[in-house]
Amino acid sequence: KITGSGFPLYKGKGAKLQRALIQYFLDYNTAAGYTEYLPPLMVNEASAYGTGQLPDKEGQMYHATADGLYLIPTAEVPVTNIYRDEIVKETELPIKMTAYTPCFRREAGSFGSDVRGLNRVHQFDKVEIIQLVHPDISYDVLEAMVTHVERLLNHLQLPYRILRLCGGDMSFTSALTYDFEVFSAAQQKWLEVSSVSNFVTYQTNRMKIRYKNADGKTQLLHSLNGSSLALPRIVACLLENNQTETGINLPKVLHSYFGAPFI
């Protein structure tokens, strides 16, 4: 009635649970040294090209044609572009950023045509973490980011698994990607809730994000990002995996954010 299928509406305690999760994720990330940003929800073509959304994923993005702007599919796009065409000092590294944004994806194609509920939607909330780091340590940083997201899922007390993707399953922008999947009790299958990737110089070369080393030589940084976390499937799995006869038990870390231990 309001928009069409694929655009969830949250009410009452459902809306409050969304807000509680977003605030918890942001607090968790900032406590780990990430600086919070609140970026624009639309970007220009250069920004979408810089992170690899264009020209590859043009059909999956909502395009405001009159202004030449694109609704963001993830906070990774505007946040990484903050440093586009900049040379940072080596002493400023690593640069750690986090942001909450709504995300917009057309999900065009037959793969999403028969998916109902919160599995695959056109608008969803997500908290993202992004790092710009020295090239020598990017794979160590990737492992640290994986541990960061894993600890978050442990705090939420959700059953999860971590997949190291093979080359054929990764996007062409990524050098190495780990996917996190949470088990859906209702559907009896695993659902992806986070993807953590090291893009090495792919994005920074497009955006010309560089640093000067001790010898004064200008070099490209490495960029990494991950979901921390995407909400629709987290919400669904929290509701599915914590049902009792009297209501839904919430994990302890959410009690103060939600204002109650159960729904």
Image: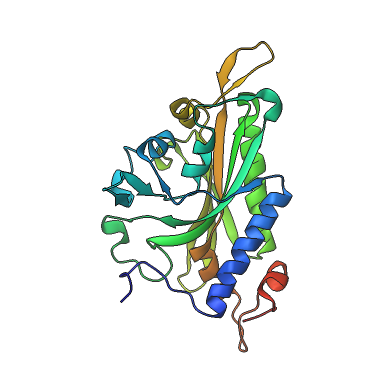
* Quadrant where the image shows the C terminus: bottom right
| Left/right of residue 117 with respect to residue 141 in the rendered view | left
Image height of 235 relative to 230, above or below:
below
Percent position of residue 147, x then y: 67, 47
* Residue at image coords 61%, 65%: 21
Q: Is residue 124 above or below residue 3?
A: above
Q: Nearer the viewer, residue 17 or 173?
A: 17
By what rule are the colours in the image chosen? rainbow
Q: Nearer the viewer, residue 64 or 59?
A: 64
* Residue 151, picture quadrant: bottom right
Q: Residue at x 42, y 34 (%)?
A: 50
Residue 55 lies in quadrant: top left
Please state the horizontal and vertical placement of residue 102, each as a whole percent of the image.
47, 58
Tell which residue pokes out farthest to the top in this image: 215
Q: How many marks?
A: 0
Residue 137 or 221: which is nearer the viewer? 221
- Identity of the residue furthest to the bottom in this view: 246
259 horizontally vs 68: left or right: right
Residue at (35% x, 66% y) in the render: 6
Q: The N terminus is located in which quarter?
A: bottom left
Most distant residue in the front direction: 67
Report x, y in % for residue 233. Answer: 50, 64
Q: Nearer the viewer, residue 258 or 160?
A: 258
Location of residue 56 with respect to 152 vertically, above or below = above
